[in-house]
Amino acid sequence: MRCSLQAYPTTDLNDANPEKVRQVMLPLLDFGKKRRFAGRVRTAVTMEDTKLVQQALFSLSGEGGVIVLDGGGSFRSALLGDINASLLEANGWAGIIINGVVRDVARLAKIDLGIKALGVTPVRSAKTGIGAIDVPVAFGNVLFEPGQCIYCDEDGVLVSDDPLTP
């Protein structure tokens, strides 16, 4: 079963399923054109480096999934810019949640992708290949695991083990 927001905002999903959801407790900002998105979670962890994530996830078919990228909350270099965001859009990803920052904000706003991150920087990331894919990651008071459902809109981000309905 797909994880979908359809006509239901996160507020309704939370109210109907308080025991099944976990709220991401970070001040995430919206940067993509798509403000409401949901999907199955794929995870990645890195520190100021995007080579592994680009090779392992960005170029794959997203099948409507959402990448949860833990960059340790670093503001030193961007983990997403317009080129990789366009690649995610073209490959069918619904969105990406970044515990870190992005760049190329004016261009990101025109890409039909959900993008949530902590902020912005003009500095690009390193390309050494450090990190891991499809491992549990934790930030914002939530443990993210591959295959979970994630629901995102202007009111926040919710995570559940199974698809939700109000």
Image (tube, helix red, strand yellow):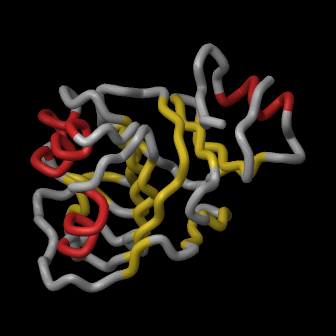
Residue 136 position in % (x across, y down): 57, 74
Residue 100 position in % (x across, y down): 36, 63
Q: Measuring 61% from the left and 36% from the top, which residue is drawn there?
A: 3
The image shows residue 133, relative to residue 146, as above or below, that is: below
Q: Is residue 114 left or right of residue 146?
A: left
Instruction: Pick whichever, 147 or 29, lies toward us.
Output: 147
Residue 42 position in % (x across, y down): 47, 59
Instruction: Pick whichever, 146 or 77, lies toward us.
Output: 146
Q: Is residue 12 left or right of residue 83?
A: right
Give the position of the C terminus as an image quadrant: top right
Q: Measuring 34% from the left and 71% from the top, which residue is drawn there?
A: 74
The image shows residue 104, relative to residue 32, as above or below, that is: below
Residue 108's image quarter?
top left
Residue 149 position in % (x across, y down): 63, 46
Q: Is residue 158 left or right of residue 52?
A: right
The image shows residue 146, relative to residue 52, as above or below, that is: above
Residue 69's image quarter?
bottom left
The image shows residue 145, relative to residue 86, as above or below, that is: below
| Residue, far top | 7
Q: Measuring 59% from the left and 38% from the top, which residue is drawn there?
A: 151
Residue 18's image quarter?
top right
**Number of on-image labels:** 0
Give the position of the N terminus as an image quadrant: top right
